[in-house]
Amino acid sequence: MLSRRRAYVCRNAAGASQSPSERVSIEISIFTCFIQGSLMLSLWLNVVASGILMGLVYGLVALGLTIIFGVMRVVNFAHGEMVVFGVYIGYWSVRMWEVPIIAAAALAAAVMFVFGYFLEKLIVKRFVNSPHHYQFIVFIGLSLLFSGILLVAFGPDPRPTASQLSFRTVSIGILTLDLARLQAAGVAGLLIVMLGAYLKYSSFGRSLRAAANNRLGGLIVGLIIPRIYAITFGIGAACAGVAGALISPLFDAQPYLAMDFTLLAFVTVIVGGLGSFGGALLGGLTIGVAEAVAALMFSPSMKTALPYALLIIILIFRPRGFFGVREV
Amino acid sequence: MSEKFNKAAETKRWIAGAIVFVILGLVGALSNSYIVSLMTIVLLFTFMGQSWNLMLGIGGQLSIGHALFVGLGAYSVGVLYLKYGISPWIGLLAGMVIAGSVGAVLAWLSFRFEVHGIYFALLTIAAAEFARIMFSGWEFVGAMQGLFFPAPTGEVDISMLRGGARFYYFVALALAAIGIAGTELISRSYLGYVWRAMRDDDEAARALGVRTFRHKILVISISAASAAAGGGILALVQGAIFPDSIMGMGISVDVLIGPVVGGLGTAFGPLVGSLAAIPLNHLMGALGDSLGIPGLNNIAYGVILISVVWFLPDGIWPAVVRGYAAIKGSLFARPLKLRKAEE
């Protein structure tokens, strides 16, 4: 947009001028305009592309939150802490065993699944049927507890995870992308597709969706609701953990990241619609691109404010997001 | 409310409340400066917790973004006093008006479009975070560097609300007393009945002719305005305003922990809860600092919140009342009519 306007101005200036010496200088300026224009274009494309890549990872984080909400009707306020657990798992496994990031992500998935499963069995299941504000308060408590544990275990200082991976780039045409980001987005996208297929076609996925649709009906036809809930919570936690491990080369590992990720996941999920699978993905992409574009157009501080502004606007005009479920 | 009010019991309650505040006043007059400053924070969060309690415990609307209103109050006092030399009394009033209107607009927007329950709670977080980020980028209010009040000279100046730590203790005590008495009076008035009806069943309340839309806006803006008053005093007590510390999630959690631990919807709950939770938080924070382990206070808060909802979902205060009634009942062997503020 901007570049096209600049080219137009340049062309006009060229047409209006007469003297040859001026023409040369204007031709040069057209040339620089063109270079600048294509630079601007490639800058924008790069920004949007990296926004989309980040958006896929956000989508995976949001998916964990939305699956838990869709099935159990609880809002996991400790989701960001689970992402940070994943970041630390990625950080330590890469540092200690020098495994590729994908192996670290698999480890994070396994660990966080078990963690989520037992968290549900031990604590969350007691509050699944209590009023919303009690659930919220329990999860605020869990979030404080986990962030405290993270602080005790790892200290408040950020740990730079800069491995070789963090600096490697890949060029596709005019796009220059971080390898780490590309890898993270690829794995995240693959996982989203696989999880979607699993929920849609497998027998467990069917029973999970049945439990989400109608808990009483599920109980009547013999679903083991507590087991489904525990596994759901495990899957949600695993999504957060994998996303955390995948982005560990991009973010310094730090306990204080947790609150940002929790809020970001909320924003993503609400933009897409709480409890909707496609909504989480779409919300993630929207937020990723919006964040990247805002960082380019405004100041970096706007980058963090923009998702909230977007959230407020969306809550006002489409209270249940793009594809939200009606009853809460 | 099924039972009739017992006039004598009511008088007893007021007298008991007055005695508690006289004791708290003596604490402020006699104890050392550490306890005074800690208790000032406890009493301020009692007051702000009371405002949150009014909204959830009586009005039935969950807010996790009360830091927004606290911060607006703090910034109104700070900006008017530091930039224009206007008395904090006016600043408090301005903050209450601003926060009350912001609360009303937020409530209007969300209930207009049927945003309620979890979505409303998330909207409050989003609004608070948005405001925090905006204030940290706004040069006029000091951005990230914050605003600083001049160091207290120790002279008490009531017209400018300036004085030493002990002065602020009594200001906070007065606020807490106003908060508790106000909640007690409101919950006994027409509004209290209407709001509790709305909390328990919105549709039934509407069927009985209650305009719940207006009443939700009213309860939220009253709650926001009183939180802003607390925030203004908090800013004066702390002597500095930073966007992260006055509008962050931490404040929202501090505000809600008192009423949740003490007892939702009760008049005394926020005081009991703040007395239990905030000193423990400071103690664990100090312990963590001295051992070099940060995060102990977070663990303490987390464990308190989970175990209160787990074991005493009504909060500590109703449990104490029940226990007292059971002992008294067994002693005098007569049924005691108990009044819980929420029923």
Image (cartoon, coloured by chain):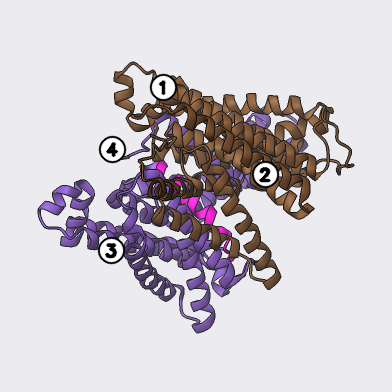
Chain colours: A purple, B brown
Label 2 with label 3: CB-CB less than 8 Å: no
Range drawn in magenta: A252-271
- Residue drawn at point x = 71 percent, y = 31 percent: B76
Q: Name the residue under label 1.
A: B213
> Which chain is mark 1 on?
B
- Residue drawn at point x = 82 percent, y = 27 percent: B159
CA–CA distance in space, label 2 to label 4: 49 Å
Label 1 with label 2: CB-CB less than 8 Å: no
The tag on residue B23 is 2
Q: The residue under label 1 is which amino acid type? A: Phe
**Type of secondary structure dominating the magenta stretch:** helix
Label 2 in the same subunit as label 4? no
Q: Name the residue under label 3.
A: A231
CA–CA distance in space, label 2 to label 3: 53 Å
> Which chain is mark 3 on?
A
> Which chain is mark 4 on?
A
> Which chain is mark 2 on?
B
